[in-house]
């Protein structure tokens, strides 16, 4: 492990990320909360770039649950076929839209429990929506954030649920929403999963686990 204390490590990470990404943009293109929900659902096991390639055609045909339910599942699949797990996601988008109309007056609910009750919406997707659409404190952890938290010695790498708890414990709640995006961008630019030189990484080289730097 780094010789820094955890508090020093957390401060260095936050300061570095603030310097590199002062105002990190939301990576998924959307014009409404509903579009954001659909885009985040589609992003599971798929890059944001790929999602942004397919959503314009989908949202041109249906950008509200009222319009989406008028499409067939095959219509939706035709638009999103190139994303991972497209058949299942297409079914979930259609059913999710039906439930929004039946149970929520066509509006995207604002609580994690209500969002997670929708088909295809797991905890990470729901956390992204409440954070980015409604400004509620959340720390969505995907596999990339999970990997970096382990590299930086902030979590034991057991699972994403534990990593979320560990990150929430060490970072102030007021920073969670921004940090989620900052870490994503940092991972893409400086800290990829493969072919990564940890010794030259702006964060891993300072706060990374020594066992990974050897």
Image (cartoon, rainbow, N blue to C red):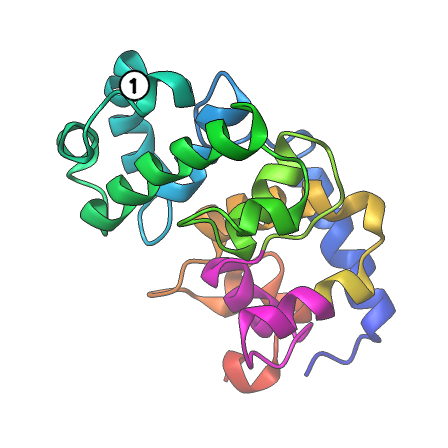
Q: Residue at x 25, y 28 (%)?
A: 54
> As displayed, is residue 200 above or below residue 52?
below
| Residue reaching furthest to the front | 102
Specify whether 86 is left or right of 107: left
Label 1 crowd (10 A; few <14 / some 14-19 / many >=20): some
Q: Nearer the viewer, residue 35 or 17?
A: 35
Specify whether 56 is left or right of 111: left
Q: Residue at x 39, y 32 (%)?
A: 98
From the top left corner, tell me how far across and down residue 136 is, in percent.
75, 39
> As displayed, is residue 120 above or below residue 23?
below
Specify whether 18 is left or right of 94: right
> As displayed, is residue 168 above or below residue 112?
below
From the top left corner, tell me how far across and down residue 31 is, in percent.
49, 16
Residue located beneath label 1 in the image:
56
Q: Nearer the viewer, residue 196 or 77?
A: 77
Does the stretch in magenta take in 8? no
Does the stretch in magenta take in 161? yes
Can residue 212 be seen here? yes
| Quadrant of the drawing holding the N terminus | bottom right
Can residue 25 be seen here? no
Q: Which residues are magenta?
A: 141-166
Q: Quadrant of residue 204?
A: bottom right
Q: Residue at x 62, y 35 (%)?
A: 109
From the top left corner, tell me how far across and down residue 117 is, in percent.
53, 51
Q: Residue at x 80, y 75 (%)?
A: 4
């Amino acid at each position: 492990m780094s010789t820094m204390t955890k508090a020093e490590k957390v401060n260095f990470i936050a300061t570095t990320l603030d310097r590199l990404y002062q105002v990190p943009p939301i990576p998924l293109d959307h014009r409404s909360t509903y579009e954001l929900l659909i885009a985040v659902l589609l992003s599971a096991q798929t890059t944001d770039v790929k999602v942004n390639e397919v959503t314009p055609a989908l949202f041109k045909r249906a950008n509200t649950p009222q319009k989406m339910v008028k499409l067939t599942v095959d219509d939706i699949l035709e638009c999103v076929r190139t994303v991972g797990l497209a058949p299942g996601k297409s079914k979930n988008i259609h059913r999710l839209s039906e439930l929004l109309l039946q149970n929520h007056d066509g509006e995207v609910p604002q609580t994690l429990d209500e969002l997670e009750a929708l088909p295809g919406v797991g905890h990470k997707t729901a956390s992204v929506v409440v954070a980015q659409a409604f400004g509620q404190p959340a720390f969505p952890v995907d596999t990339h954030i999970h990997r970096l938290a382990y590299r930086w010695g902030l979590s034991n790498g057991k699972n994403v649920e534990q990593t979320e708890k560990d990150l929430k414990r060490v970072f102030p709640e007021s920073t969670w929403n921004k940090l989620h995006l900052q870490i994503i961008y940092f991972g893409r630019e400086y800290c990829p999963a493969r072919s990564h030189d940890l010794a030259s990484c702006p964060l891993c080289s300072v706060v990374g686990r020594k066992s990974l730097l050897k």
